[in-house]
Amino acid sequence: MYLTDYHTHTERSPDSSAPLAEMAEAAVAAGLDELCVTDHCDLLGLYGEPVDGYDWPPALEQYAAVAPRYAGKLTIRLGLEFGMGHLNPEASRAILNRPELDFVLGSIHNLCPEKGGTDFYYVDYPDDAACYAALDDYFTSMAQLAVTDFYNVLSHIIYPLRYMARPISLDRYGDLLDTIFRAAAERGRGIEINTWRGRTLKEWLPILRQFKARGGEIVTIGSDAHTPDGVGKGSAAACALLKDAGFRYFATYEKRKAVFHTL
C-alpha cells in the first residue's frame, strides 16, 4: 500500500517548531512513501487581522535543503495550507503563483471579517446555539472558497467540531455541503481526510459518501501533524475508510496536478 501524509507543518508555521528534516525522518520511520509539507498561510491572523503576503524564501530554502537528501526513500512535496483565499483574490493569485508549488490545501480557519475574523480555536462554544452560529459562518465561507481557483483540495471539512465539547450534528448543512462538493468536483478539485493525528476517522465516512455522491473523485489523506510524533497517524486507516465509502483511488500532487493511487 502506498502511504502518504499530505497535511503537515514545520517550523515555517507559527504553531510548529519542527524542522522539516525531523518530519521527514518521522515519515520514513512511519513507513510513508510520500510526505507533503503544507505550512500555514492565512489571509486572516488569529484574531482577524488581514494578511496580504507570504514569506516564501525561508520555506523554499528549507525544502531545497531537505528534499533531495531523501531521494529514493521518501518523496517530499512542497505544499501550502492557504486559509481564507476567497477574501483577497489579488493577494491569493500572487501568493500561489510559484512554479515550485506542488499542492494547495484550501482552509477556513476563521470567522468571516464581518463577525470579527477570530480563529475558530479561540471562539467560545458555551451551548449548541453558539456551535451552530460558528458552523453557519464556517460553511458559508467554505462555499465562497469552493468556487475559486485558490486550492487543490478543501481542507478539514469538519474543522470547528474539534473545539466543541459536545456532539454537534451536521445534518442541517446537507444542502450547503452539496453545493460545496459540487463546486469542488466541477472544478476538478477535491477534499481531504484529515485524521487529526489519528483522532478523527469514522467521522469522515458520511462526508466522503456525500462528496462521492456529488461527483467528487479527488481525496487526499493528511494527519495535520505539527510535530514528528504525529506524522502519518491514521493514514492506513484512512485508506480503508475510502474503500468503505466506495472510492477506488486516493490522490497525491505534483506541480498542482493530481496523481492517483489505487487503494
Image (cartoon, rainbow, N blue to C red):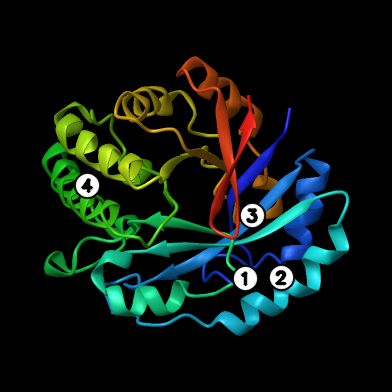
Task: Find disc 1 in the rendering and name its residue.
Answer: 100
Task: Please name the amino acid that badge 1 sits on.
Answer: Glu
The residue at the point 31 percent across, 42 percent down is 186
Identity, as a three-letter code, of the amino acid under mark 3: Cys
Q: Position of residue 7 (x, y in %)?
A: 56, 51
* For the residues bearing labels 1 and 2, Cβ distance under 8 angstroms: yes
Mark 4 or mark 2, earlier in chain = 2
Residue 209 is situated, as x and y percent measured from the top left of the image, at 37, 22
Mark toward the viewer: 1 or 2? 1
Residue pointed to by mark 4: 139
Q: Residue at x 38, y 74 (%)?
A: 93
Task: Name the amino acid, label 2.
Answer: Tyr
* Residue to which mark 2 is pinned: 63
Q: Secondary structure at mark 4?
A: helix
* Vertical position of residue 50 compared to residue 204: above or below: below
* Disc 3/disc 2 C-alpha distance (Å): 10 Å
Q: Which mark is residue 36?
A: 3
Relative depth, front residue between 179 and 11? 179
Question: Looking at the image, is 45 positioned above or below residue 226?
Answer: below
The numbered mark, 3 or 2, whose residue comes first in the sequence reads 3
As helix, strand or loop, the secondary structure at mark 2 comes to helix
Earlier sequence position, callout 1 versus callout 3:
3
Give the mark nearest the N terminus, 1 or 4.
Answer: 1
Image quarter of the C terminus: top right
Residue drawn at (15%, 46%), measured in percent from left and top? 136
